[in-house]
Structure formats: C-alpha cells, structure tokens
Amino acid sequence: MQKDMKQILLTEDEIKQKVKALGKQVTIDYKGKDIFVIGVLKGSIVFLADLIREVELPVQFDFMAVSSYGSSTQSTGAVKILKDLDASIEGKHVLIVEDIIDTGLTLKYLIKNLASRKPESIKVCTLLNKPSRRKVDLKVDYNGFDIPDEFVVGYGLDYAEKYRNFSHIGVLKPEIYQ
Ligand code: IMP
Ligand code: MG
C-alpha cells in the first residue's frame, strides 16, 4: 500500500501517542460518568477501537452510518442515515467519534439529529481535522491533528474502500484517483 502514497503524514507511532493523550483527556473530563460513544461508520472504527481502550471509564458504543462521499473525493453535502443506533440515547453522555472532519456537513447534521433525542450531553472527538475546508461552524471538543487540505487514507480512512487497513496515515498519489 505504501507504494500508492505520495507522503506519510502521520506514522503509526505518532497516531498511537495522540490516541493515548486523547483517551487520557476524555478520562479526566468525564470522571464519574458513563460514556456512550457513537462511531461514524466506516472510517472511525480503527480510531474508536484504539481510543476506547485508552479510556478508563465505563464505555458503551454503537455505530451510525451516513452517506457522504461515495467513492469520490469530493463532498456532495447530501447526508442520509443508512444505519441508525440500536437503542435510545436519552439521558446519556454522547461522544461522537469521527475519523476526519472536512467540510463539517456530515457532523453538523449528525449533531442536530442526535440532539433531538435528548442526550444529557454531546461532544465530538475527531482524529483528523481539515480546518481550511470547513463550510459550517462546529465545536470540536477533542481534536487529534489539524492537517492540510489533502486527501488522506489509512488508519480507517479509505479511498474507494481501499487502504483502511494501512497502519499509517498517508497522502495518496494524485494519479491514483485522477
Ligand atoms: P464532511 O461532511 O465534509 O466533514 O466529511 C466527512 C467525511 O468525509 C469523513 O468522515 C470521511 O469519511 C470523508 N473524508 C473527508 N476527507 C477525507 C480524506 O481526506 N480521506 C478520506 N475520507 C475523507
Ligand atoms: Mg467518515
């Protein structure tokens, strides 16, 4: 997979250190509470699996799938729920876990939708953030890395469903998707 990368942006080790730090901060901030983690499929699953093991509090989790990118690299802005939560989140401390926030359109929609279900609180944790691409105003409570406006893959993130199992996060060579 490495041969398809123009550059390795974040190594497995750098990611590991960051996930540890995020987990520690979550543990401090939510002390005495139970957390209900919601992973946004499919990109967040690798991050979520590592993050929850760095949190020393009771954690439940579930997943939602929303449509956003299809197999292209440009956001359409259209958001549709493809898979919903199995149970109610009323009264729960919800932590949304994302792989990357790009335009923010997906998350904006999700937060609004989840807020209407009366959770006790909602916070957002993302591994990657592309601030220069933001189209809507969003509060990001936990942010792993700000990255430049380049299409990245690995550690859960895909291009056309590929590279999710790459251990580092890399920038794909443009000829791969052009
Ligand atoms: P947003 O609605 O534009 O914030 O899109 C967020 C979603 O787009 C993420 O959860 C990813 O699935 C996808 N996405 C955005 N940028 C990238 C990228 O650089 N690589 C892979 N997926 C991306
Ligand atoms: Mg995603």
Image: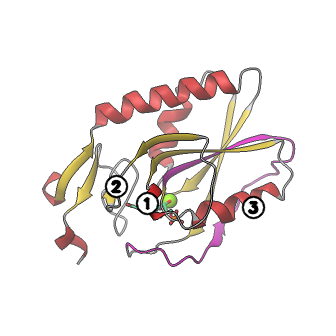
Task: Identify residue type, mark 3.
Answer: Lys
Callout 1–callout 2 Cβ contact below 8 Å: yes
Which amino acid type corresponds to the residue marked 2 in the rendered image? Answer: Pro
- Residue picked out by circle 3: 112
Q: Secondary structure at mark 1?
A: helix
Looking at the rendered structure, the number of numbered marks drawn on it comes to 3
**Vertical order, 39 against 13 (above or below):** below
* Quarter placement of the C terminus: bottom left
Q: Which residue is mark 1?
A: 132
Q: Is residue 99 visible?
A: yes
N-term mark: 1 or 2: 1
The alpha-carbon separation of the residues under discs 3 and 2 comes to 27 Å
- Local SS, label 2: loop
Instruction: Report the residue at 79% width, 52% height from top.
Output: 87
Q: Nearer the viewer, residue 90 or 104?
A: 104
Nearest to the observer: residue 49 or residue 104:
104
Indicate whether residue 23 is drawn in magenta. Answer: no
Q: CA distance from mark 3 to mark 1?
A: 23 Å
Residue at 61% across / 73% down in the picture?
A: 79
Whether pointer 3 and pointer 2 mark residues with C-beta atoms closer than 8 Å, the reply is no
Q: Which residue is mark 2?
A: 148
Query: In whole angstroms, how far apart are the C-alphas of marks 1 and 2?
Result: 7 Å
The residues colored magenta run 73-100
Instruction: Tell me residue 133's x, y (percent).
Output: 45, 64
